[in-house]
Amino acid sequence: MWSRETIEWRLWRVFRVLSILFFVVITAFPFYWMLNLSFRPFGDVLLNPLRWVPRIEDIRAALAPIGCIWHTAPQCEAAIRNSSYVAVLVEYGFLTYIRNSTIVSLLTVTLTLLFAIPGAYAVTRLDFRGRNTLSWGILLIYMFPAIVLGIPLFVFFVRIQHALGIRLRGNLYAVTVIYLASTLPVALYMLRSYFPTIPRDLEEAALIDGCNRLEVIWRITIPLAVPAIATVALYTFMIAWNEFLYALLFLVEHQPAWTLPLGLQQLDSQEVPRTFLMAGSVIITVPIIVIFFFFERFLTRGLTAGAVKG
Amino acid sequence: MNERWMWKGRRPRSLKAQEARLAYMLVAPTVFIVLLIVIFPMIWNVILSLEPIRLADLPRVNLLDFHHFTLRNYHRAITARGGYFWKVLVVTFEYTIGSTILALLMGLWAALIVRDAFPGRNIVRGFLLFPYIAPVVSVAFIWKLMLDKNIGVITLLLARLGIPPISYLTTRSYPIHIFGLEIGVPLALVTVILFEAWRYFPFAFLFFLARLQAVPEDLYEAAAVDGASPLQRFWYITLPQLYAVAGTLFLLRFIWTFNKFDDIFLLNGGAAGTEVLAVQIYNWLFARRNVGVSSAVAVIMALVLGVVVFIYLRWFVQEEE
């Protein structure tokens, strides 16, 4: 006879293996399917929707244009015409959107760090009236619906355009400032929980040696907080790279300013083959997954520090 | 002698006052940004909700005409289309609560199976975070395509199991028969909720995993010595350790799901009984081109969220005591 202990234990082990398989399938398969469809011609997808692996010749055709970067062969024109990646990048303007998304994301990272590092330092190390209100208030913003901020800002942008003739809609830099509403709370919150772990003695020693506070921040706090700052930078980058709602509200009228998520969403129409949509998805997703795998340890810690809302 | 130059003509300030002054300088840029893109829009949103403005009038109309303040927008928001607003409110809660609970349960399940080491655990853990870190736009389109009526891989696989191909994201109600009874399942809403659970379980997973790994091993050993079976150990030791983190997670996920716009907008645009408040605000502004009513719904949404969070916190804090 098996004891209750053994029976439950064996059942649990079987259940655990099945569960692991289940989770791997549901998390990895959609991304595999995206890749699969992005490499196949749309005609083939319509005929054989359940082809699990793309044919070799289709993969070769999808990758053929890479060879054309270095030397132009006569078959290059055909190769370019047949690749969904080239179609998306060139004909549908994804090269521009990649550039825009990169600019917006890097600028958001820079501005966020520029504002959040001094702010978080003041909140953790300096004593001033309104300090608690400030740090709680910032957290509240994090809980506020983005769409509710979006509408008045949209109205504001329209008015500015008519009153002063400054076009803020369709302006990448204006939208970057709005992105700060979603990145600053994250950055302040994470830095505020990291700065107290830096020993105060070091800062005080530097103050006695004649540094002023700004020098202390620059020479001591920032170098010691590099891991936290890196995490914040990565998250801010990912938030800006993935952001959709504000891009839709503020950039949609001016195609040259579209970011990748907006560009992809605008591809979603009956006239565009679904395989192009998947090629576009690959282009947006791959950088994020690469970043994630390189910095997984930083990022996982940041997630549990309550960092990223979704 | 920098200091003297800075304070010339005045009494040298105390160290404390100097520190505060520096602090204000350091937080000023953040405060400025917050005032500009958070506080000011919030106030302006309330003002807009009290004025009869349509999108087309926006460039010309006087936005600070306090004589025309009216509550008509609120009236319209609530009564338009035969009280459709209430339906949207109910759907918002069903969607929010359904996705939150499912995401938490899936996260707990995933955390339990990944807690103990096995070959390849780190890779599996990495995979489990994919849905959460990937851009919404691409995951929404992947699922939309996998659920496509004609070429969707999920639709076709389910068809092989005998479920006729249907459009999962645009079918409002799908009749199923149980014991001769016909029940209409709100298929699109259920599909959207499942998508949300899939996308956001990793967040709960990470929190539960961190908490599970902090449960002291000797608790389990002591229970095993006392003859508790694995299931009993889970029920009486593991679960109680997770209540607090589950409460926090529920609150966070509730708030963020309640506020969500992107996911439903991208999956089916709020069609077939999946329109939530955030999508309704957008539709009032851009489909029906009414700024005033759109802002009124936005104010209502913020208030509803505030009230729910307040009640939850009160209740939760009392439970803790």
Image (cartoon, helix red, strand yellow):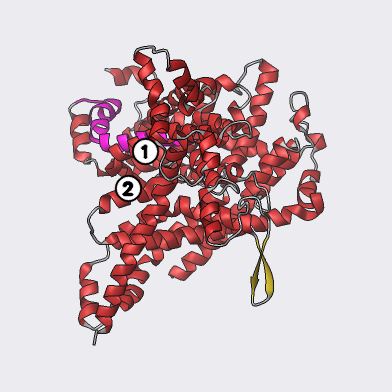
Q: Residues within 10 Å of mark 2 (few under 14, many from 20)?
A: some
Extreme residue toward the bottom, this view: A1
Tag 2: amino acid: Gly
Q: CA distance from mark 2 to mark 1?
A: 10 Å
Where in the figure is residue A18, as x and y percent of width and height?
35, 63
Q: Residues within 10 Å of mark 1 (few under 14, many from 20)?
A: some
Kindly indicate whether the residue at mark 1 contacts the one at mark 2 (C-beta within 8 angstroms).
no
The span shown in magenta is A210-239
Numbered badge on residue B126 = 2
Tag count: 2
Residue A120, can we see it?
Answer: no
Say above or below: B44 vs B302: above
Where in the figure is residue A214, as x and y percent of width and height?
30, 26
Q: Is residue B14 left or right of residue A161?
A: left
Q: Residue at x 53, y 61 (%)?
A: B161
In-front residue for pair A236/A8: A8
Dividing the picture into quarters, in which one does residue B107 lie?
bottom left
Q: Is residue B88 left or right of residue B263?
A: right
Tag 1: amino acid: Ile
Q: Residue at x 38, y 33 (%)?
A: A287
